[in-house]
Image (cartoon, helix red, strand yellow):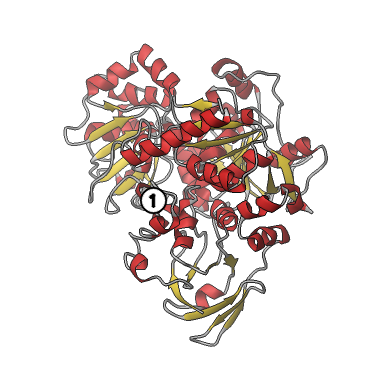
Amino acid sequence: MGTIVEEIFSNKLGRKVTVGEIVLVDVDYMMSHDNTTPLAIKAFRDIGKPIKDNDKIVVHFDHAYPAPNIQAAEAQKKIVDFMKEQGINNFYHQGICHQVMIEEGFVVPGRIIIGGDSHSNTYGAFGCFAVGFGSTEIGCAWITGKTWFKIPETIHIKLKGKMQSGVYAKDIMLYICGKLGMDGATYKSVEFSGSYIDSLPMHERIIFPNMSTEIGAKCGLIAVDDTTIDFLENETKAKGPFEKVKAINPIYEKEIEVDVSLLEPQVACHPDVDNVKELKEVEGLAIDEVFLGTCTNGRYEDIEVFAKILKGRKVNRFTRVLVNPASRNVFEKAMKNGLIQILQDAGCTIGVVGCGACIGRHAGILAGKERAFTTMNRNFVGRMGSPDAEIYLGSPAAAAATAIEGKIADPRKYLEG
Amino acid sequence: MGKVWKFDNNLNTDQIIPARYNITIDEKELAKNVFCEIRPDYPKNVVPGDIIVAGDNFGCGSSREHAPIAIKGSGIKCIIARSYARIFYRNAINIGLPILECKDAYDGISEGDKVDVDLSTGLILNISTGKTFKAKPLPEFVLKIVEAGGIVNFLKNHEIEELAK
């Protein structure tokens, strides 16, 4: 009985948990990446006790991989040496940690995963309780196998209606960010449900828990249904049977209903994720770089939407257009299905799989006074390079239209029908 | 007693320390660039014992622990904010950077004021104006971590189960 988060913890602990209660719980996996593992190792070494279970540790190289400079190279070498020393074998360097966690089958309904990355919330799309942690706690959990949580209150966001053509889950989530604000759900769990969510394939559902971080949430969760289970069985290495995690007679702190059929393409404008406007309000704003990728919108279907619009067209001469597939699997599928060729022909630069330009540590760094339109999840000042650059966020389709015109453009004019 | 550095709402981790400086985990090195873009005078002029006063949702954004570490490395005695982003809150506690949540202090303390804080009682005194404020007390298990000087020190001498007792 309870919200999804209460259900997951009650099942784990074998007793009913209540909101506000602090629990100590076994963690199924502890994830970290090249940026956050060094501090986890430091905490681990400082405590000086052994790892509890090596198989529960998962390490990804994705934030700045392959290393763009000597310092990153040294840091990554230290991580590799540590993994060899400790016998940690869950090591991946084949794309963005969150995408690879899903593909490799670590993300399963009912599990509890802590991640040294603020977008670990992403796994909530599969009814998996996942939260972002700092590195020190990851290193501590390597030793203890456990961590503490305060059972959060839940905000229920019910999404109904059918979205208009040219409008995507990203637009809807940006709208929600604008409405709730960057601290609209601080410390809370956010559940997404309703006929609109039910109708969505997984790559679109993922956007909501992924960006729940942007409204301050502890986690974002979606109930498990046949769509979830089909995806886990066919698109990931996860082994069933899968728990049909869902809320049972939940009591929510707050309920919000949104009719998605009323929404147009949205853009989060410089300098905050909650500075959200309808795309038409910023249409025509000159753009120096378009970036398609990230844990929010770097999946196969995102590249497909983007390529479909670019097919037979060229990107604007003065706009850099970068595409970083979320993972090696995504890249391979896009290549086999001819999407990479379309992007090449249109004049895009295909980057290595991983986080790419999103954190300003790899390729695609912005100069002062430059303006980027990206499919990322945040647009903080200085995130992609110069603090004098501006970042705008939107859907892959809007990014494609913008790439063609070199200024923020409405994708609907490029879509058939 | 410390001098106050005042920040607004929704201060994010990129503003605390941009990702390009997160190439080290040394707190003194990180401190050289803390707030470098929004307050370029901060790294040069901050003095050990100074205090940060901020609005809501302090430390939102990334999970990067470099943010509280950089602040700690700059010698800040304590942060007093109306509220914190959740990962920042946990991170600060875990690395032993004292943080207090207080709804009223923000409006009653100005940039440059001299402020005294008693971490054990949560009492805040604005020496410049004579006003006092009371911060929300830390939950008991959080206090155990803070008193140990952070989670690493706690786990050196205790089992994690003792937190819940």
Based on the displayed image, in which of its 4 quarters is residue A10 positioned? top right
Rendering coords of residue A413 (x, y %): 30, 30
Identity of the residue drawn at 58% across and 42% down? A139
Identity of the residue drawn at 43% across and 32% down: A62
Evaluate whether residue A378 shows in this view. yes
- The image quadrant of residue B73 is bottom left
Above or below, A411 against B143 in this view is: above
Q: Amino acid at mark 1?
A: Phe
Q: Is residue A183 above or below residue B6?
A: above
Residue under the point 23% across and 34% down:
A320
The foreground one among A41 and A404 is A41
Vertical position of residue A234 compared to residue B22: above or below? above
Tell me: A363 left or right of A146.
left
- Residue A337 point in image, percent of width and height: 37, 13
Looking at this view, name the residue that lies furthest to the top.
A336
Q: Which residue is mark 1?
A: A380
